[in-house]
Image (spheres, rainbow, N blue to C red):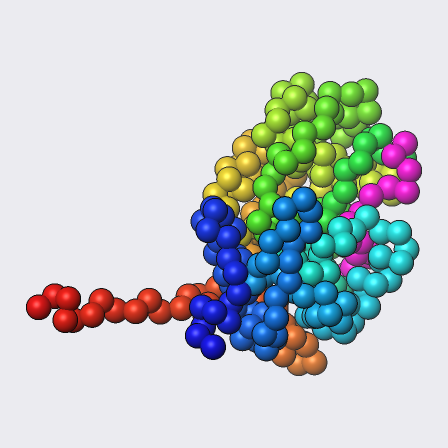
Amino acid sequence: MEPEQALGPQNPGDGPLLRRVRLHQSWYRATVLGLPRWGTTRGRSPRQLGSVLCEQDAAAGLNFVSLAVKQLYDARHAAGWGIDPSSMAYMTSSQALTINLFGLLSQDDAWLLRCLNEWLGRVDLTSIDTVELEFAPARRSQHLNDQTRIDVLVVVAGARGTEVVAIEIKYTDRFNSRYVDISTPSYRELAMNSGIWADPTHVLTDRRVNQLTRIHALATSHGLSLNIRTPVSLLVLAHELDTSAGQIVNKYRECVTTSVVQLISLRTACESIATTAPPSQRTTARLLQLRYGDEHVSAWPQPSPRSSSLR
């Protein structure tokens, strides 16, 4: 089978980012996982795509980088965790990406600390208290009375004391996909009690930064409930072709007072994970890097023009 055929169907209507990611995930399925079959999307207009696992391969947990990560997914799902079932099959799923990255890192506190220190430009973080994937309060009334979730919430200790790190991960999805009215008493009270925004009236009504504002607010509210006053660090991992993510992170950074707001490319994040991996995890970490960071390996060479046509 020719390389292009092995990749499976692609969607010619995709934009540059989604086209690149789908191509790479199709390559990973065919070349690294050695899976000749592909699956079909769900919804009203299903279509076959090379970046979707077939039902059997999805059920076998092949969208996850290790058995331990798959078991974490199963445990969270059984607990009624807010999960999209398509993350089992869609290789382009941001939720599958989150589970793969932090399901792996959460198995070794020292490894996670090495990565967090590097991504945040620090050296002082020394211990992990908790790591929660898809964090949300058990009841909305506990915090801000909405349905905001945080991809990864870490409570960590360092030279500044105990603090919260909130991590948002984007793969092919975009910010601002869902706008929530947060100009509410709960958010205004948090703004007054925490001082995290220079101009609360502006940030609570700016649609461009709505999602980051909600994530930062929930992490801050959670920290305050634990008597943590240290400003929350907000970390965004995004594809380097996602220029809009960089623009939104820069815009939100202008809104905060003392919190760190940091953007890291997925390529850089995966390189950090691989280079800092403990010996027992090096092979899995390298597979993770190959899947989400090393997209250059799936750039199939294009055929050269025939010399006869130039004579």
User: Considering only vertical position in the picture, is 204 above or below 62?
Assistant: above
- Could you tell me which residue is drawn at 72 percent across and 65 percent down? 55
Percent coordinates x, y for residue 123 in the rendering: 63, 59
- Could you tell me which residue is drawn at 86 percent across and 62 percent down? 75
Percent coordinates x, y for residue 33 in the rendering: 61, 75
Asked if residue 165 shows in the view, the reply is: no
- Could you tell me which residue is drawn at 61 percent across and 24 percent down? 206
Quick check: 268 left or right of 110? Answer: left
Between 193 and 31, the one nearer to me in the picture: 31
Percent coordinates x, y for residue 215 in the rendering: 71, 39
User: Considering only vertical position in the picture, is 33 above or below 8?
Assistant: below
Between 8 and 116, the one nearer to me in the picture: 8
Q: The magenta stretch spans which residues?
A: 127-141
* Secondary structure mostly seen in the magenta stretch: strand
Quick check: 27 left or right of 123? Answer: left
Residue projecting furthest to the left:
311
Residue 224 quadrant: top right
Assess whether residue 138 is covered by the magenta stretch.
yes
Asked if residue 224 shows in the view, the reply is: yes
> From the image, which quarter does the C terminus lie in?
bottom left
- Could you tell me which residue is drawn at 16 percent across and 71 percent down? 307
